[in-house]
Image (spheres, helix red, strand yellow):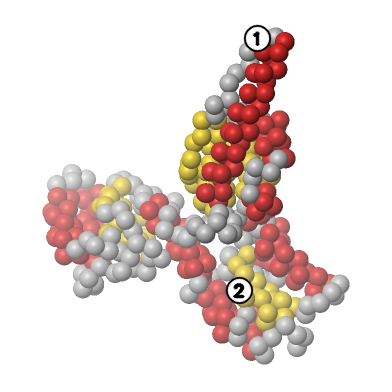
């Protein structure tokens, strides 16, 4: 299963329980890293079960012990901890008893924890989903600058740079001109330092290609224009700058301001590939240009049988098993698979108008 499909399946399973609430602290969450001993966990749950016998409320006592017993039974099915660990959610929610186990995590779980609460704690599982593409962040002012990364929704500060640019003086005449030249030289050195730090952060280890999807730059309008208009930045960073934004601060606060102000640009960039493919599909559908296309379960199934699918477009709203089935069939004939979010107009159209399934074809059938 591809990383995208595995991540989507994981997200959907987590979404089933993320917002569920018990009537009290009756829902059990277990995080078991790969190095943890399962027998130790079984013994711990037995101990917790005994302790829960002291709960005064009969309903709460019964529900907590039922959740612990089910979690213990699930662990006893394994001889050893799976490669990436185990996560277990058990407990009574209204009239339903929830029992959900993750033993096929895409990455190792690092947190070791037992939690009994009024809701399931899903955050550590959600953090295992392959992160979204990384975007480079630069905020620069005359007195400081900060280099960062946006990975998914997380802002990481990589480097903070203090400037040596002196403030303006009251000197007049030749002294004023001399101080102006010094400040200009110091500003240039500051910008060079920022550009070098950006290259170290955003280019790959060999310094040969960009290691982020794009770069966002923020600062006061005059400073940003001055910084970008010269040749301090590596040309690959310059060519992949998605936008410049007016930001008041050159520190971590500035990074957050930059991300907030660039939200629409980021969303458009993340959706650009899916938009482009949906655009090709719509062109073919209208007959404006090649390629041939298909949509809906019946047409796409037939195109897959004939080996005619170049790229299959699948709405993320589809059932996970259906996504897996169609993806595997497409990959078996060398087709590309594009998962399409419903967070933009074309994605909603794929779901609502075309049944969530469409294809750009290699040839007409």
Tell whether label 2 touches label 1 (CB within 8 Å). Answer: no
Q: Is residue 108 left or right of residue 289?
A: left
Q: Earlier in the sequence, mark 1 or mark 2?
A: 1
Q: Report if residue 262 is visible in the image.
A: no
The location of residue 2, given as percent across then percent down, is 50, 72
Nearer the camera: disc 1 or disc 2: 1
Residue 287 shows in the view: yes
Q: Is the residue 167 above or below the residue 354 in the image?
A: above
* Rendering quarter of residue 183: top right
Quarter where residue 341 is shown: bottom right
Q: Nearer the viewer, residue 275 or 63?
A: 275
Looking at the picture, how far across and down is residue 259, in whole percent?
59, 42
Q: Give the labeled residue for mark 1.
A: 170
Residue name at image x 38 percent, y 63 percent? 107
Q: Secondary structure at mark 2?
A: strand
Q: Quick one: SS at disc 1?
A: loop
Q: Residue at x 24, y 62 (%)?
A: 35
Asked if residue 18 is positioned above or below residue 352 in the image, the reply reads above
Q: Is residue 149 above or below residue 336?
A: above
- Name the foreground residue: 286 vs 80: 80
- At label 1, counting other C-alpha atoms closer than 10 Å, the crowd grade (few under 14, some 14-19, many 20 or more) is few
- Residue at 39% x, 57% y: name it: 125
Tell me the tag on residue 337: 2
> Residue at horizontal 14%, vertical 47%?
54
Q: Nearer the viewer, residue 11 or 252?
A: 252
């Amino acid at each position: 299963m591809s990383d995208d499909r595995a991540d989507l399946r994981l997200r959907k399973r987590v979404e089933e329980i993320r917002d569920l609430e018990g009537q009290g602290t009756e829902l059990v969450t277990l995080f078991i890293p790969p190095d943890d001993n399962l027998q130790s966990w079984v013994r711990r749950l037995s101990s917790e079960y005994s302790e829960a016998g002291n709960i005064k409320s009969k309903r709460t006592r019964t529900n907590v012990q039922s959740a612990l017993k089910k979690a213990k039974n699930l662990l006893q099915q394994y001889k050893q901890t799976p490669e990436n660990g185990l996560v277990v959610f058990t407990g009574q929610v209204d009239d339903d008893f929830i029992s959900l186990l993750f033993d096929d995590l895409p990455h190792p779980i690092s947190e070791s924890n037992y939690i009994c609460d009024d809701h399931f704690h899903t955050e550590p599982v959600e953090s295992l989903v392959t992160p979204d593409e990384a975007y480079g962040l630069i905020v620069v002012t005359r007195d400081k600058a900060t280099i960062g990364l946006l990975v998914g929704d997380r802002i990481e500060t990589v480097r903070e740079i203090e400037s040596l640019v002196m403030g303006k003086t009251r000197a007049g005449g030749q002294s004023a001109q001399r101080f102006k030249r010094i400040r200009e030289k110091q500003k240039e050195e500051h910008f060079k330092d920022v550009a070098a730090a950006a290259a170290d952060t955003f280019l790959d280890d060999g310094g040969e290609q960009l290691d982020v999807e794009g770069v966002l730059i923020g600062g006061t309008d005059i400073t940003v224009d001055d910084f970008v208009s010269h040749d301090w930045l590596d040309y690959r960073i310059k060519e992949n700058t998605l936008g410049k934004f007016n930001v008041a601060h050159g520190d971590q606060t500035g990074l957050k301001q930059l991300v907030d102000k660039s939200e629409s640009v980021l969303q458009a960039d993340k959706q650009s590939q899916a938009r482009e493919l949906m655009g090709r599909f719509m062109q073919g559908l209208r007959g404006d240009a090649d390629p041939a296309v298909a949509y809906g379960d019946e047409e796409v199934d037939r195109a897959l049988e004939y080996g005619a699918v170049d790229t299959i477009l699948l709405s993320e709203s589809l059932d996970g098993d259906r996504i897996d089935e169609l993806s595997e069939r497409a990959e078996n004939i060398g087709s590309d698979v594009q998962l399409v979010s419903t967070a933009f107009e074309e994605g909603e159209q794929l779901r609502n108008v075309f049944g969530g399934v469409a294809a750009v074809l290699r040839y007409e059938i």
